Amino acid sequence: MTQLAEASAPAPGLLARLLARREVSLVLILLVVLLGTAAINPRFLGAGSVRDLLLNVTIIALVVVGQTIVLLMKHVDLSVSSTVGLTAFLSGALFIAHPGLPIPLALLFGVVLGAALGAVNGLLVAYGRVPALVATLGTLYVFRGITYAVVHGGQINAANLPPAFLSFATGSVLGVPNLVLLVLVVMILFGIYLGSYRGGREYYAVGSNAEAATLAGINVTRRTLTGFVISGAIAGLAGVLYLARYGTVDASAGTGLELQVIAAAVVGGVSINGGVGTLFGAGIGALLLGVMGSALVTLRAPSFYQQAIQGALLLLAISIDIVVSRRTARRLGQRRTP
């Protein structure tokens, strides 16, 4: 009788299915924050304000791409902020040594350097069997220490950078900043990779059940190493864009970025238990946190409210993730029960 009742139950409508998705809920919250703040201060949605908002979110949204891949494997990469800082300063030093360096080569330099730093994390986690939280926390301080040693109290200013590099950072296509377009391209490409290709789906399999993934023929060790290399490479690219965005870089560049990135990914629906989440949701999470921060600044709220709201959203997202996981496990258990 129960099976007949379930079979005869009407399927949920399109609207109900859309509202059940975390991404749709985030978009609705985002619209409420945008329209509510604009109602109080109409200049919040002005062309200049929107441009600055998008530029402020670009670095976090880019690093979220790599962090999402690591979180899907049920790991975490805390060293991304130090990777951003180190690659930003060394890219600036490279421009000073070679003023005529083409911008694509500078971007490639950041990607290669970041990938090398990510490989250190991958080797520790995949082959050294060190928990990712411990390994990346250690490299967070190691990479930051290397940055302080390299910087040695110095600083790179916009006056030291080539005009072409600075114009790339401030330029736009059809009103959309170049940095925003570049980040969108990266997110779309990796979103397609994770959703449509076997290599991308393997990250979900590893995070869902590593033992089952191994039985299915997936090389979990190699996939884990590759995930951390990708995370480092994207953080390295973000370091070059950080230099282009702000122009001034010192040893503290990127400090604290890792917490914002993790919060954005988790708020966007990427499960801390691995195997669940999309880059679209993670990107919306980064945008939501950025909009809330800008809204609080526009409304002249104390700065600590921004951190409090980020923490509250993170706790809410984790709580929702736990509740959904338990309900899913309960449903699977009921289906297996004769």
Image (cartoon, rainbow, N blue to C red):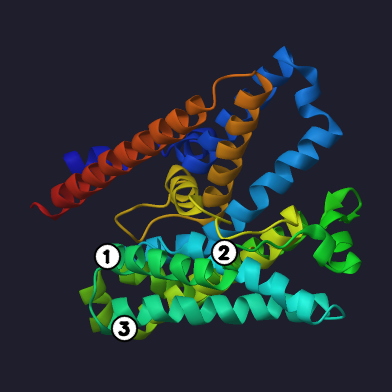
Whichever of labels 1 and 2 marks the residue nearer the N terminus, that label is 2
How far is disc 1 from disc 2 in space, using C-alphas?
19 Å
* Residue pointed to by mark 3: 221
Percent across and percent down for residue 28 are 58, 30
Q: Is residue 20 visible?
A: yes
Label whose residue precedes the other's in the sequence (3 or 1) = 1
As shown in the figure, which amino acid type bears the numbered disc 2?
Val
For mark 1, what is the residue?
134
* Point 40% across, 60% down: residue: 78
Please tell me whether mark 2 sits on a helix, a strand or a loop: helix
Is residue 89 positioned above or below 248 on the image? below
Say whether residue 13 is left or right of residue 106.
left
Label 3 – label 1 distance at C-alpha: 18 Å
> Between marks 2 and 3, how big is the CA–CA gap?
25 Å
Contact check, label 3 and label 1, Cβ < 8 Å: no
* Image quarter of the N terminus: top left
Q: Nearer the viewer, mark 3 or mark 1?
A: 1
Image point 64% across, 75% down: which residue?
110
Quarter location, residue 134:
bottom left
What residue type is disc 3 on?
A: Thr
Q: Which element carries disc 3, helix, strand or loop?
A: helix
Q: Say if 18 sits above or below 227 in the image.
A: above
Q: Amino acid at mark 1?
A: Val
Give the number of the mark in front: 2 or 3. Answer: 2
Q: Residue at x 46, y 54 (%)?
A: 258
Residue named by callout 2: 84
Question: Along the line of sight, which residue is nearer the eye, 6 or 249?
Answer: 249
Task: Give how far across and how far down residue 112 sits, in percent.
Answer: 60, 82
Indicate left or right for 30 with 67 as reference. right
Residue 96: image quadrant is bottom right
Say which label, 2 or 3, has the lower sequence index: 2
